[in-house]
Image (spheres, coloured by chain):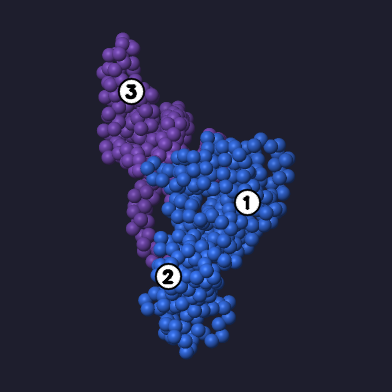
Chain colours: A purple, B blue
C-alpha cells in the first residue's frame, strides 16, 4: 500500500489523539510492570516486609521450587486442554451460526454474547449448583436410577476446565465466526461445480480460509485460560490451583511481594512468548484481520 | 445441447423464474439479457444446481440433470467476482477441477500449462490471485472453468467488473475462446451491447419470464414488445395512428410526423400504434420550408464518431444521433425531424409486435 509521507502537523495531531491512550497505558501497565520488575529483585525478610536489594534469589526459586514450575506446567496443561476442547465444540457452533439463515443469525449471535451480561463470578457459582453432590446432574442421574451415590464432579480439575471452557468459548466462537462469515460463498459454489462434494469443499476452502480466525481464537483462549484466577478458586479442589492462585496466595497470604512479582512476571513472559511465536508464524495482524476482514 | 423444459425456480414463496422453455444448441453461445432482478442469474445458476427449488426439467445432452448433485453435473461456472480461491496459487486454482477428478499429477501439470497458454498467461502459475489484475483474474477463472471440458460453460456477468477498455478486449477474447473450444456457453448480462456483440442467440428476460429469443440482429431490428425495444438500444417508442392502410404501403402519423412505410400492416386507418424508431434513424436537420412540426434541441452530446441529440417535440422526448455531423445544431435550436420509414417497427395497441408484410 502506498503511504503518503506525514507532515509535521499531522504527526503532532496523531500524537495528541493518541495521548490519552498512551498516558493510560503508561500509568496502568508500563509503570506497574516496571515496579514489579524492581520488586522482583528485592529480598523478602518475612512478616510481609522486604528489603531493597538486587538479588536473583527469587528468580532462581522459580526454577528450583517444584511448587512453582509444576504450577506453571499445570496451568499450561489446563489452558491447552480447555482450548483443544473449546475448538472442537466451538468450531461447529461458529460454522452453524455463520451458515445459518440471515434472519436467524442476529438471534444466534445475541444468544452467544448473552452470558456476558451475567457477572463472571455468578456464572462460576452457577456450576456449583449444576455439578455439586446435590446439584442438577447428580439429582437427575439419581432420580433416573443410573447411580446410587453422587458422582464427584465439583472441586475437580474437570469442573475447573468446565468453568474455564464456558468462559473462553464465546470468545473463540466469535473469532471463528468472523472468519467464516467473511468467506465468499461463491468460492464454495465454485468448488462444488469443479467436482467437490460439500465435505471436500469444506476441507479445501472453508477450513483453510477460517484458519486466521481459528488461530487468533486459540491464542485468545490460551491466554485467557492461563490467566484464570477465580475459576480454580471457586470450582477447584485443594490441588486444582492454577498459577493465578499461586500468585494470589504469595501476595495476599504470604505477603511476599518480591516472589509475587517474580511469579506475575513469569506468567506474563510465558504468555508473551506464546503470542510472539504466534505472531512470528501467523502474524499478529491476522487477529485484527479476522475482525475487520 | 442444453434444454430447459418448463423450468420454474423459486426461493420459498418468491418465484424468480417462470416457466422457461429454451434450447441451446451444442456449441451455441447464448446471452441471457435483462435488467437486474429479472431472474437471468437464477436461471443460469440453475444449470449448475445452485438456484432455489426447481420444477420442470433441465437436460444436458439429453440427460436430465435436475436431480444430479452440483459436483456431478460437469458444468463450468465463471462468477461475476471470479471467485478464485485466494489461498491457492493460480496453478492450484486451475488444477482444482482436475484434481477432484482424480487425474495423475503429470497430466494435471500438462493440462494446466496448456490452459495457461490458451488464456495467454503462461508465467502466472505460481502467483496468487490477489497478485493479478482484474483482467488476469478473469482469464484464470475462465481457464479454471473450461479445463475440465464441461458440457456447458456458464458465465455470470463475466465482464461487469472490468474497466471499459479491457471489457472490449475480453469480449472478443471470450468469443474466440468459445468458438475454438466449441463449448456450449450461456452467459448473463444486463449490457445489451455485450449481448448483441458476443452471442449467437439473445434471450431477453423480464420479471422472471423470457420475453423474446432470437439472433442479435433479429431482436434488435424487430423487437416483439415495447420492453425489448426500449431495453435494446434505448429506442424511441412513440405513440401514433395509422392514417392509411394499403396493400403496398402504410402511412402512419407519429407524434405529428408522417411516415410512409413500404408493406402491408394488419391494421385499419385510425388504429392506435406504437412506432419503434432507434436514434440513428431519426434525422435531425435545421428547419426548412416543409410543414413538419418543429422540435427543439434539449441536449447535445458530442461522442466523436457521432453526435447524440435529445429533442423535445411538444413535450415528447426523442433521441436522435447523427453520424459525422458537419453542421451541428446547438441546445435551444429549433430542429426538423424525419423518420427513416424502412427502419420503423410497429407495435399494436397492446404492445406486441405488428408485422409488416412485404418488408425485406
Q: Nearer the viewer, residue A164 or B9?
A: B9
Residues at marks 1 and 2, CA–CA distance in whole angstroms:
43 Å
Question: In the image, are marks 1 and 3 on the same chain?
Answer: no
- The picture places residue A223, in percent across and down from the top left corner, at 42, 39
Q: Nearer the viewer, residue A20 or B314?
A: B314
Residue B269: image tag: 2
* Quarter of the image that includes the C terminus of chain B: bottom right
Which mark is in front, 2 or 3? 2
Residues at marks 1 and 3, CA–CA distance in whole angstroms:
73 Å
Q: Secondary structure at mark 3?
A: loop
Residue B104 is left or right of residue B222, and the answer is right
Q: Are marks 2 and 3 in contact (CB under 8 Å)?
A: no
Judging from the image, mark 1 belongs to the subunit labelled B
Residues at marks 2 and 3, CA–CA distance in whole angstroms:
100 Å
The furthest residue to the bottom = B289
Residue A155: image tag: 3
Task: Give the residue pinned by disc 1.
Answer: B28
**At 59% across and 45% down in the image, what residue appears?**
B2
- The picture places residue A232, in percent across and down from the top left corner, at 34, 29
Amino acid at each position: 500500500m502506498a503511504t503518503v509521507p506525514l507532515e509535521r502537523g499531522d504527526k503532532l495531531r496523531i500524537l495528541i489523539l493518541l495521548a490519552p491512550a498512551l498516558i493510560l497505558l503508561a500509568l496502568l501497565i508500563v509503570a506497574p510492570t516496571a515496579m514489579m520488575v524492581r520488586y522482583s529483585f528485592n529480598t523478602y525478610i518475612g512478616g510481609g516486609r522486604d528489603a531493597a536489594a538486587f538479588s536473583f534469589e527469587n528468580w532462581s526459586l522459580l526454577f528450583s521450587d517444584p511448587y512453582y514450575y509444576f504450577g506453571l506446567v499445570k496451568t499450561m496443561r489446563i489452558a491447552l486442554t480447555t482450548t483443544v476442547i473449546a475448538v472442537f465444540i466451538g468450531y461447529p457452533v461458529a460454522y452453524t451460526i455463520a451458515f445459518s439463515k440471515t434472519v436467524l443469525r442476529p438471534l444466534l449471535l445475541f444468544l452467544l454474547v448473552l452470558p456476558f451480561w451475567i457477572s463472571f463470578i455468578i456464572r462460576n457459582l452457577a456450576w456449583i449448583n449444576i455439578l455439586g453432590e446435590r446439584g442438577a446432574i447428580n439429582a437427575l442421574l439419581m432420580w433416573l436410577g443410573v447411580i446410587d451415590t453422587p458422582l464427584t464432579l465439583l472441586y475437580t480439575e474437570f469442573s475447573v476446565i468446565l468453568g474455564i471452557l464456558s468462559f473462553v468459548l464465546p470468545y473463540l466462537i466469535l473469532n471463528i465466526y468472523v472468519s467464516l462469515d467473511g468467506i465468499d460463498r461463491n468460492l464454495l459454489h465454485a468448488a462444488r461445480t469443479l467436482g467437490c462434494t460439500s465435505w471436500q469443499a469444506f476441507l479445501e476452502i472453508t477450513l483453510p480460509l477460517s484458519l486466521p480466525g481459528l488461530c487468533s481464537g486459540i491464542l485468545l483462549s490460551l491466554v485467557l485460560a492461563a490467566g484464570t484466577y477465580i475459576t480454580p478458586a471457586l470450582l477447584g479442589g485443594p490441588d486444582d490451583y492454577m498459577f493465578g492462585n499461586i500468585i494470589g496466595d504469595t501476595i495476599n497470604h504470604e505477603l511476599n511481594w518480591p516472589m509475587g512479582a517474580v511469579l506475575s512476571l513469569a506468567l506474563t513472559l510465558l504468555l508473551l512468548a506464546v503470542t510472539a511465536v504466534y505472531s512470528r508464524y501467523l502474524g499478529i495482524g491476522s487477529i485484527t484481520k479476522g475482525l475487520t476482514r | 445441447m442444453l434444454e430447459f423444459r418448463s423450468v420454474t425456480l423459486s426461493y420459498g414463496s418468491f418465484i424468480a423464474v417462470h416457466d422457461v422453455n429454451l434450447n441451446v444448441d451444442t456449441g451455441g453461445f447464448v446471452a441471457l439479457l435483462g435488467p437486474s432482478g429479472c431472474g437471468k442469474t437464477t436461471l443460469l445458476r440453475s444449470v449448475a444446481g445452485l438456484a432455489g427449488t426447481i420444477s420442470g426439467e433441465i437436460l444436458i445432452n439429453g440427460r436430465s440433470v435436475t436431480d444430479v448433485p452440483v459436483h456431478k453435473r460437469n458444468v463450468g461456472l465463471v462468477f461475476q467476482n471470479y471467485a478464485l480461491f485466494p489461498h491457492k496459487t493460480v496453478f492450484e486454482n486451475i488444477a482444482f477441477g482436475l484434481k477432484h477428478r482424480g487425474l495423475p499429477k503429470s497430466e494435471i501439470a500438462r493440462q494446466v500449462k496448456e490452459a495457461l497458454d490458451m488464456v495467454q498467461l503462461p508465467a502466472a502459475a505460481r502467483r496468487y490471485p490477489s497478485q493479478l489484475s482484474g483482467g488476469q483474474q478473469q482469464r484464470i477463472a475462465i481457464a479454471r472453468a473450461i479445463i475440465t471440458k464441461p458440457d456447458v460453460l456458464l458465465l455470470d456477468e463475466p465482464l461487469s467488473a472490468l474497466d471499459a477498455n479491457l471489457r472490449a478486449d475480453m469480449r472478443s477474447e471470450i468469443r474466440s475462446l468459445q468458438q475454438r473450444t466449441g463449448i456450449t456457453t450461456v452467459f448473463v448480462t444486463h449490457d445489451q451491447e455485450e449481448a448483441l456483440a458476443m452471442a449467437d442467440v439473445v434471450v431477453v428476460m423480464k420479471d422472471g419470464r423470457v420475453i423474446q429469443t432470437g439472433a442479435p440482429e433479429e431482436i434488435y431490428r424487430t423487437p416483439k414488445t415495447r420492453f425489448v425495444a426500449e431495453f435494446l438500444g434505448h429506442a424511441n417508442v412513440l405513440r401514433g395512428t395509422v392514417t392509411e392502410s394499403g396493400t403496398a404501403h402504410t402511412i402512419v402519423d407519429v407524434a405529428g410526423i408522417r411516415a410512409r412505410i413500404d408493406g402491408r400492416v394488419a391494421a385499419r386507418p385510425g388504429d392506435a400504434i406504437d412506432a419503434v424508431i432507434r436514434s440513428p434513424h431519426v434525422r435531425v436537420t435545421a428547419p426548412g420550408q416543409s410543414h413538419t412540426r418543429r422540435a427543439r434541441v434539449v441536449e447535445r452530446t458530442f461522442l466523436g464518431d457521432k453526435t447524440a441529440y435529445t429533442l423535445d417535440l411538444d413535450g415528447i422526448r426523442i433521441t436522435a444521433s447523427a453520424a459525422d455531423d458537419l453542421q451541428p445544431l446547438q441546445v435551444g435550436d429549433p430542429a426538423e425531424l424525419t423518420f427513416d420509414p424502412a427502419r420503423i417497427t410497429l407495435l399494436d395497441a397492446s404492445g406486441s409486435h405488428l408485422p409488416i408484410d412485404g418488408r425485406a
